[in-house]
Image (spheres, rainbow, N blue to C red):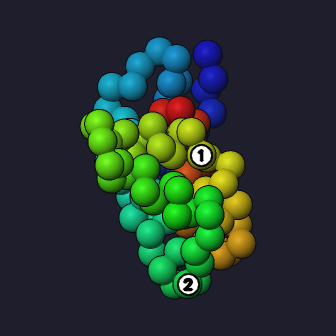
Amino acid sequence: MDDTQHPKADGGSRETDRYLSFDGIDCNGNARTVMALIERHLSEAGQTGPFWDYFMSKRKPRSGPPPDDLFLVHCHINQIRELFEERAAAEALALLGLLEEECC
């Protein structure tokens, strides 16, 4: 079992082992926050392009149910990390790392 301390989204810490339990971990809430950070950073950067247009359109598909935010983050975590690194968004990177560690 991993006994390291992991930061919580609110800045505190707790011991977790994602393979034992997701109880008490707000994966969906943290994923929603990451999505809001993506939207903010794209807007601030004026960044558009084929990938980000595709990514944002997946949130509201023309047909079928929309995927949840955790699924979208999980599927595109490397591109999201790159965006946050380019924007020097340390807090966003920390939250993304937490989400990846605890929920993906």
Q: Mark 2: give few (<14), some (14-19) or many (20+) Cα within 10 Å.
A: few
- Marks 1 and 2 close (CB-CB < 8 Å): no
Q: Residue at x 53, y 74 (%)?
A: 42
Q: Is residue 12 left or right of residue 96?
A: left
Q: Residue at x 59, y 78 (%)?
A: 47
Three-letter code, disc 2? Gly
Q: Is residue 81 visible?
A: no
Three-letter code, disc 1? His
Sequence-first tag of 1 and 2:
2
Q: Classify the position of the N terminus by image quarter.
A: top right
Does 93 sit above or below residue 4?
below
Residue 8 spot, x, y in % from top left? 45, 48
Q: Residue at x 51, y 55 (%)?
A: 55
Residue 12 spot, x, y in % from top left? 44, 52
**Nearer-the-camera pick, 18 or 57:** 57
Instruction: Determine the secondary structure under disc 2.
Output: loop
Residue 76 shows which numbered tag?
A: 1
Q: Which residue is mark 2?
A: 46
Q: Is residue 60 left or right of residue 92?
A: left
